[in-house]
Amino acid sequence: MTVSERLGSRADITAGVVTTFRTLSRHPHPSYHEEQVGEDYMEFLRGLGLSPVRDEAGNVMADCPATPGREGEPLLILQGHMDMVCAVAPGSGFDPLIDPVTVLEQDGFLCTDRRSSLGADNNLGNAAALWVLERGVSHGPLRLIFTVGEEMGLEGAKVVDPAWLAGAAWLLNTDGFHLGRAIVGSAGGRRECWTRPLDTCPAPEVEAWNISLTGGTGGHSGDDIHLGRINPIKVLAAWLKNQPTLAVADFSGGSAFNAIPAAAEAVVMGRKPDLSELEQALLPYRTTDPNLKLDLSPADRPETVWTAHFRREVLDLLTALRHGVYAMDPQFPGVVGASANLGVARREGDCFAVRLFLRAAREEDEGAMAADNRTLAEGAGFALTVTGYPGWPGDKNNPLALALDRVYRAQTGRGLEINMVHVGLEPSVFRAKAPGLVMASTGPDILDAHSVDERAPLAGLADYALLLAGLLEEPLS
């Protein structure tokens, strides 16, 4: 009997994975708020007859004994993260700390009602793994690890006890995003937060206006950075820079370091703005961002506005900072090697904050981008707070990836693409904790992650579940 015959029809497999995903999506789970979803994982694992444990950070681990007769095989770890980037549509009323995502099946996709992102990154890959185990497939010694805070810089992985990795020969991460691909390397990441105290003066006796630029496609700052989508922060800042008669009372845009901004807005004071030049600036993006919307409306009169000096330096900085692809990878054709995402610009307390995410496969590219940012930001009076994580060097001869390729070829007649990706993955942190561990990453297809358009094709879920089941049933040595 084949793996597919044991798991059921493709429709049965898809339904099972989706049902498990819904179980893991019952509670809100943005980064640093994984308490309830962690309990959902614990409950599911106990339902499999396992004895899961949870560390102080909230990471979850459970050992799964081998199927009888396979006890002597090397230990395999299945690993993914529980948190999500919760992008929210402006004006939707969605509260990511209170509201669970609305999971829908529409037009062949798993998606949301577009009030929020879906969280398929990474709960969908985890759901497939857990459903396969629930079906009782044969496997050798197995360990399950689910982490917190991945979307905030792999923070949960950083504090995983090395004992959780000890004794394992293999680790398969389920955060791969692209069905048909085995990932063997990933970019390092540098999160820069630049802040400067606000410098304001009394507001003039003129009208106040709110300018909003919404409906950008947004997306994942690594996976989608090469697609040329609009960054509303940069476009609105560049337009304001050329409108010196408008005083600026406030400016905000973006939602997270690692999400391409989908919206920005400003409160300005002066004669009613003519937005025709701003409309023209949007024309090049009408294909990549078809839902762009520009609005002008009267605003309540603020008490203060930015000083002319502060206005000039902040807008100069926002327009000068790099956003987009910096370099392509020299070893993996078609893969972005280095990029920058200007993710957030807004008032935070008594300061103005600018948050960027730099990704790079090579340390020299990260260093060059960071040096450019330092020159620009320090010249504008901003101070830096930085966190980051290392890259994971790629190896096309990775034996776990080759095992995945064998299984996929047997099941589909097609080989897996073995490649690296321009995103951060937790193996980059685990490699220092367990230097001999052979790691790879796979995942179901996920489109427009970290945006309200995030969706996953239902047609591929059965193939991903079968790939996981086939790997578990193939003895690894």
Image (cartoon, grey):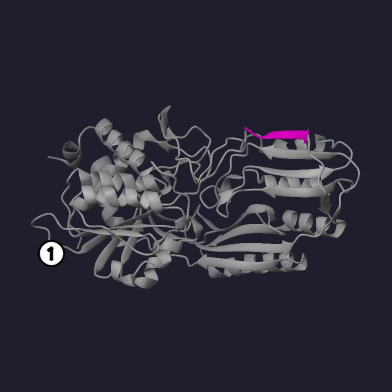
Q: Amino acid at mark 1?
A: Gly
Residue furthest to the top = 107
**Residue 235: quarter of image:** top right
Residue 296 lies within the magenta run = yes
Residue 417, image x, y percentages: 38, 50
Q: Secondary structure at mark 1?
A: loop
| Relative vertical location of residue 473 with respect to residue 171 in this rendering, above or below | above
- Number of numbered markers: 1
| Magenta residues, start to end | 291-297
Is 100 positioned to the left or the right of 341 in the image?
left
Q: Foreground: 257 or 59?
A: 59
- Residue sitting nearer the eye, 240 or 34: 34
137 over 149 or under it: above or below: above
- Please name the residue shown 84% across and 35% down the image: 274
Residue 113 visible in rendering: yes
Q: Is residue 415 visible?
A: no
**Disc 1 designates what residue?**
72
